[in-house]
Each structure stands twice: as structure tokens, then as C-alpha cells.
Image (cartoon, rainbow, N blue to C red):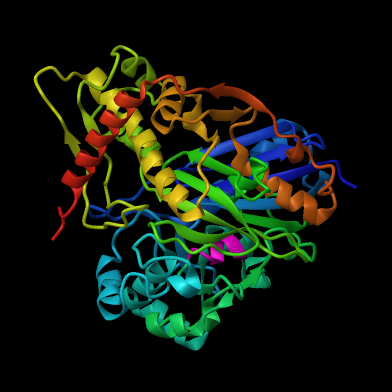
Amino acid sequence: MPGYIGAIDQGTTSTRFIVYDEHARVVGMDQKEHRQIQPRPGWVEHDPLEILDNAGEVIRGALAKSGIRGRDLAGVGVTNQRETVVVWDRRSGRPFANAVVWQCARTRDICDRLIEEGGADRFRPTAGLPVSTYFSGPKIKWILDTFPEARRAAEKGDALYGTMETWLIWWLTGGPEGGAHVSDVTNASRTLLLNIHTLQWEQAHLDILDIPRSGLPRIVPSSDAASWGPTSEDGPFGARVPVCGALGDQQAALVGQACFRPGEAKNTYGTGCFLLLHTGTEPVTSEHGLLTTPAYQFSGEKPAYCLEGAIANAGSLIRWLRDNLGLIRTSDEVEDLAAEVADNGGVYIVPAFSGLLAPYWRPDARGVITGLTGYATKYHLARAALEAAAYQTRDVAEAMNRDSGVMLRELRVDGGMTANELLMQFQADILDVPVSRPGTIETTCLGAAYAAAIASGFWSTGENPVSSWRTDTTWHPSMESESREAAYREWKKAVQRSLDWVE
């Protein structure tokens, strides 16, 4: 058997490809950013063709850096930004429009009508989700309703739709020449169109949103022993490599963090924050603003489910300080600025750039900076920006405790922001639980590699390297209870100031 496994991580700001050996060690990696297109306030788009080109470039780059060839890979897994959606022509592969990104708020009118007609939780019993601009079903409807060419193609069965793993897998396995049009259960569950109990598309939801079923992908397990077809020999791999694993990025991180037992939880700090709690093989309905979603499904097994709290802006707030305000030159500088002061000086930033997600679900919210006085400096702003990620995580953790009936005892963390030790210590302080970071913080790609490795037989479930997850660093809470609760009360006041901004 070939001696390596590969994983594509198609994220919100960049695409990377990582090659792992049999011990889950990284032997080659390449990464490239893509443009963030914002044609209007609250709107976010990506160019799917740019992302496709970047994927090819980083695959070739990582293979070159590792000194191996495509035929040395036992399989390929894909992980991706989940709710970002593309609609394209099945004959030419040409997108009808730019991809509508998960952060985008352009579907607010559609969602408002859905809520007015049937309530915010009208789909929750079957889909596990509230009506929100976050999810990809309304985004598909928006594209079909806005671009007549797309609607006509969909009615004739000539349009395909899917999230970013669907788009990449279709092209990698042949595109217009017979590419596999598939979506794994984790990504399919983010559309508002999937019945999470049957793991089939729910026709009643398609009818409500006026989305023709013919354009939807086939639903498959996250790790699929049958594979979805090999890559094309004339593609970036230069060989026929099985594509056999796919997970939405946050579920991939859950797998990469080895959270395979009910009660285990992880939080990923990237563009946003995503806290997931494994709840077992039966879905748990949330009554406190969380999402019920498949965690993963291995071929031939029951799916595992989780509760999720999705936070739209974490690392993106730091980039806003860098790119929009010019407060820092690189994202890494924010920790040095924040460390210049002992606290936030009473300043709080609520980064509701296009509304608030869990547990509030308020598209009318907009970002605010509160508590400003003449005492406040750029150092307090930097600290408040970091603390915003921790406060939002506590909002989600409290809702999760109420829904699950299980108090959080430890939080496993991953993602680029976990390199920021000031943030990790504050997270432990404001949650009052230990925060543990593994040796490999980029667990998203590792989870996708795991899914492909199991499907291809490269690793078995009993001896895979992921099962030997180890803590690298643990931060323990050190804040006094009175100070913790006083600071959190101020945060909640700041959140209230952000609401009802868009009428």
C-alpha cells in the first residue's frame, strides 16, 4: 500500500494541502490565501474558480516539498468551510455566480419570510437548525432567484449545487467528465435541507425553499470505504488517488481532537469559534440556541451527533484590527499589545459584523465597542478583541451545559489563535475550567486525513495515531470568582447594546 495520506483543508481565508506519513507526521504542506469579496456591507463572496486553482497549486506544492508523487498517496480527504455554497453548470463546470460565504447576511429577507410564515424553529425538528442566514439552503435559493440562468438550468436538471467539499470533489474526480457529486453527512446537515434523523434530503424543505432536488449531491458517510472515485491522472495529483473522506471543518477538528466519546468537547479558534460537544448516536434537541448536527459517520456505522455553538467572528476581528484599522501590522502583534495592560480598561468589543450566531441568532445585531473613556488606549482595544473570543465561547458553553445537563469539565482547543497564550489563559479564567491544547493545533486537516485513512485501510480504527491524542499545554483558571462574574456581566451588557441595530 502507498505510504502516505493527503488532506485538503479548504478554509474561509485560504486553502492548504497536507501530506501525512503512517505516524500522522506532516511531511509536506502548502497553503494559499484567496480573496474576500465584499460587494456590500454584510455580504461576503468567494470566487470558486480561484479556490479551485489554489487547490491545484497547493496540492502540487505540498507534493513537491515532500518529495513524493501522487501515486504514493493511499487516499485523500477533504475538509471545508461548511455553509459556503456554489451553484454551477454540470456540463461546463462554470459557476453561475460567486460562492456565497457562510458569514454572508444577504439572505436575511428570505429568512425573515420563512420565520414570519412558520417561526424560527420551523425546521428544527427535522434539520436540527433554526432558520438563519448562516445556512446554505437559503443561499442556494438566493442564487437561483437572483440569476435567471441558474434557475433555468436547475429546472432542466443542468445545475448542480453544493458546499465547498462537493465543488472540489466533483472537479478532482472528473468534473464535467463524470465527477462524483457528493456531500458527506456533516456538510449536508448545514443546509436546512437534510433530515438529520434519516440522513436524506427532506422534500418538504425543498418545496418550501423552491429548490429542485435534481441539483443536490448524493449524501455519503464522512469516511466512505466505497470511495467516490479516483482523482484524474491529468489533475494536480498526476495519478488516480481515491477520494474517500470528507468532513465539515468543525467536525473534522472534533475527529482530529479524538472526541469520540459522549461528553467530550472541543473549540476551534479560527475565523470564527466553533464549540462542539459529542452527544452520542442519537441527536439531542437544543432549547438554548445551539445546533444539533451529525458529528461524523464512518462507513457501515451509525452516525455520531453533537451539539454545536457557532460564533461568526474571532480571528476575523483580529484581521479587522490589522486590515481595516491598521492597529497592527501582523495578527501576531495583537498579543504583545494586549499584554501591555493588566485588563481591558472597561472596553468590550462585540464583533457582530453581520449579526450574532449562537446562542443569540440575531441577524439584526451589528458590531459595537462599549465602555470607551479617555483612559482607553490601543492596548485596551487589542485586549478587548482577544477577550471577545473567550466571552463568546462562554456564552455557548453555558447554553451547552443547560441543553446537555453535563457541566463542562475541560475544553480541548485547536486552531491558529490557540498559539496566543494570553487568550488561552483568559479563556480558562472566564470559563473556570482547564483549557487543553494538543501538540498538533491544526487538527482540522488531521481529521480529514483520518477519515480518508480509515476508508482506504491506511489506518484502522484500533491503531490510528489520532487515538493517542496527547495534551501539549493546559491552562488552569486563576481568576477570582467575583472578578469573573463581574466581567461577564459587563460583556452581557455590551451584547445587549449590539442588538436591534438593523431595522
**Quarter of the figure with residue 372:** top left
Whole-percent x, y for residue 271 in the image: 42, 41
Q: Quadrant of the C terminus?
A: bottom left
Residue extending farthest to the top is 340
Q: Residue drawn at (15%, 53%), measured in percent from left and top?
A: 501
Residue extending farthest to the left is 374
Q: Is residue 329 left or right of residue 71?
A: left
Whole-percent x, y for residue 392 in the image: 36, 41
Q: Which residues are magenta?
A: 184-190
Q: Is residue 214 left or right of residue 60?
A: left
Q: Residue drawn at (54%, 46%), measured in percent from left and top?
A: 54
Q: Residue drawn at (45%, 81%), measured in percent from left and top?
A: 206
Name the foreground residue: 265 vs 77: 265
Residue 454 included in the magenta stretch of the image: no
Q: Tell me: residue 158, above or below residue 313.
A: below
Q: Residue drawn at (38%, 67%), measured in percent from left and top?
A: 139
**Quarter of the figure with residue 273:** top left
> How many numbered marks, from 0 up?
0
Name the foreground residue: 88 vs 189: 189
Q: Is residue 296 left or right of residue 482?
A: right
Name the foreground residue: 100 vs 149: 100
Whole-percent x, y for residue 164 in the image: 53, 58
Residue 188 included in the magenta stretch of the image: yes
Q: Tell me: residue 31, above or below residue 254.
A: above
Q: Tell me: residue 382, above or below residue 175.
A: above
User: Looking at the image, can residue 34 be seen?
Assistant: no
Whole-percent x, y for residue 23 in the image: 80, 34
